[in-house]
Image (cartoon, rainbow, N blue to C red):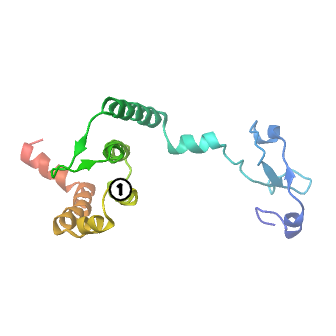
Amino acid sequence: RGAMGSLAELKEPMKSIPSKELGGVSSPYTCSLESGNSGPGQSVLVPHPSFGQQVSRIFKRTQVIVFAAATIFILGVCVAMRNTVFEFPAGQEVEKWKVFMVLAMSVYMILLMVFELPCEVVLLVGAAIFALAGIIDGTDVLAGLADSATTSVALLFPMARAISNTGLLEAFVGLVLGT
């Protein structure tokens, strides 16, 4: 008999366990495979976390507050600039929604990078959103990624991370500064 019990016990229908037996945890998903005795061989499924618990695991309270403040700021800027006319250097007028979307996406992308989402993911998703919205062409996105300067900078990031992880940079700075 293993931790899950015998094969005959697995074929029995699942029964609900009262919340008092689980230390006060109440959930509609709390259930067990039990054979009538409550011993060390009994298998208990962990209760499914609520929607609020799942969201709080992903988004911290400070992040939500910062994003809400950024949204209020962006809306304020949009309202203040609603009568402004935006033009290309050639004199052609730019649609306002495009300007405001670039502003909003730039602020949100910076915040996502500050909250430690991978920069490359944030920037690629931002470029894809701009391409899907029609703000830039898909060919321009691919041309920007194919540029040798962009590729060179992108290849420097793994090397910088490796140097940082080895501690070589800190040792060199300590040697130069004499600490």
Asked if 100 appears above or below 81 in the picture, the reply is: below
In depth, the one of 111 and 159 nearer the eye is 111
Asked if 107 appears above or below 12 in the picture, the reply is: above
What residue appears at the point 31 percent right and 63 percent down from the top-left corner? 137
Disc 1 is placed on an element classified as helix
In depth, the one of 2 and 160 nearer the eye is 160
What residue appears at the point 17 percent right and 53 percent down from the top-left corner? 169
Asked if 106 appears above or below 129 in the picture, the reply is: above
Q: Is residue 52 left or right of residue 174?
A: right
Residue 178 at x, y percent in the picture: 8, 43
Asked if 39 appears above or below 115 in the picture, the reply is: below
Q: Which residue is mark 1?
A: 130
Q: Quadrant of residue 22?
A: top right
Q: Is residue 108 left or right of residue 43?
A: left
Q: Quadrant of residue 53?
A: top right
Image quadrant for the N terminus? Answer: bottom right
In depth, the one of 51 and 44 nearer the eye is 51
What residue appears at the point 87 percent right and 64 percent down from the top-left corner? 9
Identify residue type, mark 1: Phe
**Direction front: furthest residue:** 92
**Direction right: furthest residue:** 36
Q: Is residue 46 left or right of residue 107?
A: right
What residue appears at the point 10 percent right and 48 percent down from the top-left corner? 175
Residue 76 at x, y percent in the picture: 36, 29
Q: Is residue 107 left or right of residue 30?
A: left
Q: Quadrant of residue 25?
A: top right
Residue 179 at x, y percent in the picture: 12, 41
